[in-house]
Image (cartoon, helix red, strand yellow):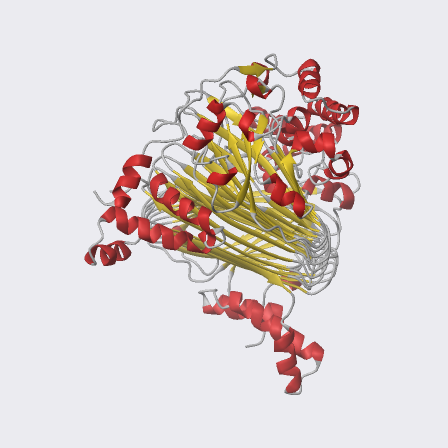
Amino acid sequence: MDTREKDIENLKDYKYGFTTDIENIKAPKGLNENVIKFISNIKKEPKWMLDFRLKAYERLKHLKEPNWQKPKYPKIDYQNLYYYSAPKSMKDKPKSLDELDPKLLETYKKLGIPLQEQARLNGIAVDAVFDSVSVATTFKGELTKHGIIFCSISEAIQKHPELVRKYLGSVIPITDHFFATLNSAVFTDGSFVYIPEGVKCPMELSTYFRINASETGQFERTLIIADKGSYVSYLEGCTAPMRDENQLHAANVELIALDDAEIKYSTVQNWYPGDENGKGGIYNFVTKRGLCKGKNSKISWTQVETGSAITWKYPSCILKGDNSIGEFYSIAITNNHQKADTGTKMIHLGKNTKSKIISKGISAGFSDMTYRGLVDINSKAKNSSNYTQCDSLLMGNKCGAHTVPYIKNKNSDSNIAHEATTSKISEEQLHYCQQRGLNPEEAVGLIVNGFCKEVLQQLPMEFAVEAQKLVGISLEGSVG
Amino acid sequence: MNEQLQSDFDKIVKVSKISKEETKIKKEFLNKFIKSGFPNRKQEDWKFLDISQIIKKNINGLSFFNDYSQSNEIDTSIFVNNLEHNKIIFINGRIEKIDFDHEDQNKIEISDDTKKDIPFDYENSLIDLNSALNNKVLKISIKKNYSLKKPLIIYHSTNDKINSTNINLRLDFELGKNSCLKLIDYFTNNTAKNFINIFYNFNLEKDSILKNYKIDKFRNNNLKYFFNNIEQENNSVSETFILSAGSDYFKNEINCNLNGEYSSAFINGFFSLKENQQHEIRTTIKHLVENTKSYQLIKSVLGKNSKSAYQGRIFVNSKAQKTDGYQLSKAILLDETSEFNAKPELEIYADDVKCSHGSASGSLDENSIFYLMSRGLNYQQSKELLINGFLLDVVEKITDSEIRNLIKDIIGLKE
């Protein structure tokens, strides 16, 4: 067996599917004011934060769950969920990694995310989120030297309230859509990043999300602020145990880039996708939005979506500052009974704004893939341009691939170009590869990797290797 | 509005002497319409241009009563001169003349006793409105192996007898095996503000060919909605061309079902809009069996304060392997106030298909203008020449050379 086959053999089953047996503190089941107060209380939040949550909850009562998406799912009983679950050992936050529950350390080690800093060679600072709380953040010392704040959002609420208060909810207002508002009311933890003026973050920042407890929704909240002239590259990874039930993950991610700042946000999403028959898996309903607030700012989203039973998200850019740039690179792979409805929104408000969308969708098995995107060029966004390319690859005739772009051009000086193709791997391509000694699976892997290359290139090195493997594995068994 | 609708409906039943049975069917449609009202932007298909708002804004007190018992005088000046053709003339929604002089009368059958049901699933309250209020539904059947010698022109005109009125019209076409029909819908220019709601239903049998050209060129203040449903059997071909330029509001909707193998559908058209015009084309092409083909090309030239929208949907069933689908929309925005919206949609459930779409919008290319101006044309001339070329591309797609030349004449395009 060569190494590749071994890799596949090892990874064929969802290897992150284990559960960690750990004692939890949970909020009472259900969604009501008391639960929100409970969450706020246990996190020792200031009053303004509680008010923020309650305001969102008030609003939520008037909102209906959206229903326009392509993948339909059985109704979620929001009263039958735990909105807060945390390892007991986290009740009083450990001061250093040495005090951290060894079980948690073990879990992250198993996931390949060692939290001990000395074990980390490639210099990525990690914030690890376990169910509802952030358990550890590494490399704090190094980052503080540069004045960078990288901590859990709960900590930021305590220590940097002025920043959180100013920016939280400024990109995704609490009155947004149903899931975003739900998140605003009950969010538990997530990461907070602040890069001060003129600082180029010396290492990749990363958050690792893990759902462990059952019947729990994970509502994480991430806020990244890049001050004038700064740069940050942020990575996000996710896994969950294998369960028969469907678990909800409704996160809000807000990015703010001020003058000349750049944020690069990469996601490798590998939530548990459910079994071959489509049982179980995560509902990944995430709101991600970036605001290019200042001049010459840039936000770039890169995502590799291979997990989740249903993925429903549109990482977006609001290009408000003049000359700002928004980019979106995506690979979405669905196999078995997975469903994905994903894409982006590029809202051009400032002059000379540019955006680029590259989306690659691959569907196999019984799955359904939809690209849905909006390009909106406002009448004031003079001289703006957009380029969109979305390609889909189909494997088998039981799956579907759909493209639903919305294009609105209200400015005569602006250009929008959109292209989309749908095809399958041609016999010629396969034949060519096989002729040169590759077996069919390898040939498909090679072709698919070529198909995805434009997006994979955008990922930071370590992630790209991981993602490339993931692409191969997700499609395992769909050829033939 | 509903009371008005109700009383106008009763008035129509009284004047037109509609049978009890028919009244009952019509009443059902009416109730369905009253329940949903005019479509609005909350409905996905009406997202870009909200007809309920447009009607409210443009027509004060829309009347639904239309007296079909009175005949109208035909104004012969509206006729197309340099093309021999058969005629059907509608004035104020009433059929004034049917003339198939150029054809073998045995090969064409015209009847008005068609069943009034709708042969397909729909969620469209305007079809309900049409079915409740239309006058006679004519069915035109072309017998098998017969190709019409001359094109049929349907004149849609209104006179100054009516204003702020809703006109509903429905025609059914049955094209027998190996038959051919060239159909031109010709809208004339009148200034009254009416809401015209037209519904065509085509049935194309094996090997038949339909060529439908809709010409709305002359500036008028009407609001129009035109729905085509096309059912296609094996090896049939439908070609639709839409010239959308005259009315204040015009929405063309085409629903085409490719039910038979080797059938193909072509939809081409352009918008040429000025002051406050709002036009839309929405197409749905369903590839339901193997080896079918569709091609769409829509272009827009948008002047001051105008708005165009194109929603194109290609649906490919899991059985429909070897489908070939193509969709392209292009727009030139001439003014800061013009707006272009597009939603080219692909919905694909089969893997051995070739489907692609593209959309591009922007201003006229400065380099091209510079090139022309450096060769002695002035700015205006250069602009016109470029737009001319841009639109000519679509007109060239018309397969019938006689009609292509006619359309070129009408819009003054030069080669």
In which image quadrant can residue B2 be found?
A: top right
Nearest the camera: A261 or A310?
A261
Return the x and y of residue B60 as percentages of the image width and height: 80, 41
Task: Give percent across and percent down for residue B314.
Answer: 46, 47
Looking at the image, which residue is at 36% across and 47% down?
B205
Q: In the image, what residue occupies the spot 70% across and 37% down?
A: B64
Location of the N terminus of chain B (image quadrant): top right
Q: Is residue B257 visible to the viewer in this orientation of the structure?
A: no
What percent of the width, then of the height, locates residue A471?
38, 44
User: Splitting the image into 4 quarters, where does residue B69 fall?
Assistant: top right
Q: Is residue A387 visible?
A: yes
Residue B229 vertical position relative to residue B388 in the rendered view, above or below: above
Q: Is residue A8 left or right of residue A62?
A: left
**Quadrant that contains the C terminus of chain B:** bottom right
Residue at 52% across, 46% down: A123
Residue B413, percent from left and from top: 59, 72
Residue A385 vs A145, above or below: the answer is below
Q: Is residue B322 left or right of residue A247?
A: left
Residue A460, relative to residue A311: is it above or below? below
